[in-house]
Each structure stands twice: as structure tokens, then as C-alpha cells.
Amino acid sequence: MSHIGIIYWSGTGNTEKMAELIAKGAADAGAEVTCKNVSAASPGEIDGYGVVVLGSPSMGSEVIEESEMEPFVDAVIPKLAGRKAAIFGSYGWGDGEWMRNWAARMKDAGINLLDDGLIAHETPDGESEQECVTYGGRIAAF
Ligand SMILES: Cc1cc2nc3c(=O)[nH]c(=O)nc-3n(C[C@H](O)[C@H](O)[C@H](O)COP(=O)(O)O)c2cc1C
């Protein structure tokens, strides 16, 4: 089973909580997992991961976070062509437009994306907590 790298940005902790739950699901399924804030990550490290998992809440106006996550995503997309990836994030008042656009951007770049990403409304709890853990297990089997 390959090493899974989860790299995320989170302003108020909701996407971070999703990342931790996804990491738990993947680890419970037997995968080796590295989970870190994008501020501690470098684009080069993704070469060491079999599945690259990126997380960002919906920010600005239905975009991924622009100061740290967008430059990181922009740098890693060319490296991910033909490879496996997954994306996730929390949102507030929208309808998930940022995730649809992000998924389309990844697929257009030739990335083998798991589903069309996973979204949770604000803090994941109850059913959406379980969805994150399940998604982690599916990433481990991807
Ligand atoms: C500056 C800013 C812009 C936002 N823009 C959107 C948006 O366009 N659509 C949306 O659904 N939620 C938007 N939100 C809400 C966040 O996506 C939501 O609160 C999310 O849970 C934050 O995740 P985090 O705790 O990981 O930062 C915005 C929040 C902030 C602070």
C-alpha cells in the first residue's frame, strides 16, 4: 500500500478536522499517512506519495485559499498528471462550486482524481465526520 500525503490549509480548523478524520480512515485501513498544514509542506515532497490528498475550504468567492494553497496547488498540478489524487474541504454558505471547479481543474490536467472530492458544511460532525473517515479508507484502497 502506498504512502498517502495529506496537505491542507485551514483558517478556523474545519478543513483541518476533515484532514485528521481522513488520515484516521486511511491509517485504520493500513496505509502509511503523512498529514500536514501546507505551511509546513513543499511541492517537491509530493514525489514521495502514492496518493496526494489536498484540502482547502471555500474562500474568496468560491475559490481555494489564495495566499498559500493556490500557489501550492498550482505548483503540484503539473507533477500530478497521470497520478492518483483526492481533494476535500469545508464550506459555509455556497453550494460547493469551488470544489466542482477544483475537481474539473485537476481532471483537465490529467490527474486520476478520486470522485469529485469530498465537502463538509462548516465543522464536520455526525454523518459528515463518518464520511471523512470512509473517504480516508477509500483513499487507502485507491
Ligand atoms: C474570507 C472568507 C471567504 C469565504 N468564502 C466562501 C465562499 O465563497 N463560499 C462558501 O461556501 N463559504 C465561504 N467561506 C466559509 C468557509 O469556507 C467556511 O467557514 C469553512 O468551514 C472554513 O474552513 P476552515 O475552518 O478550514 O478555514 C468563506 C470564509 C471566509 C473567512
Image (cartoon, rainbow, N blue to C red):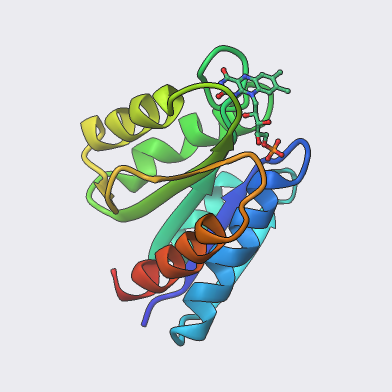
Q: Quick check: 134 left or right of 94?
A: left
Q: Quick check: 122 left or right of 6?
A: right
Residue 29 placed where, x, y %? 44, 84
The vertical placement of 134 against 128, above or below, is: below
- The residue drawn where x is 44% and y is 56% is 52
* Location of residue 2 by image quarter: bottom left
Q: Considering the image in quadrants, where does the C terminus appear?
A: bottom left
- The residue drawn where x is 43% and y is 25% is 95
Ligand 1 - quadrant of the structure image? top right
* Location of residue 140 by image quarter: bottom left
Nearer to us in this view, 138 or 67: 138
Residue 72 placed where, x, y %? 56, 35
* Location of residue 121 by image quarter: top right
Residue 91 placed where, x, y %? 57, 32
Across the whole image, how many numbered discs are drawn on residues?
0
The vertical placement of 46 against 55, above or below, is: below
- The residue drawn where x is 56% and y is 12% is 61
Residue projecting furthest to the front: 126
Residue 119 placed where, x, y %? 47, 43
Nearer to us in this view, 23 or 118: 118
Res 78 seen here: yes
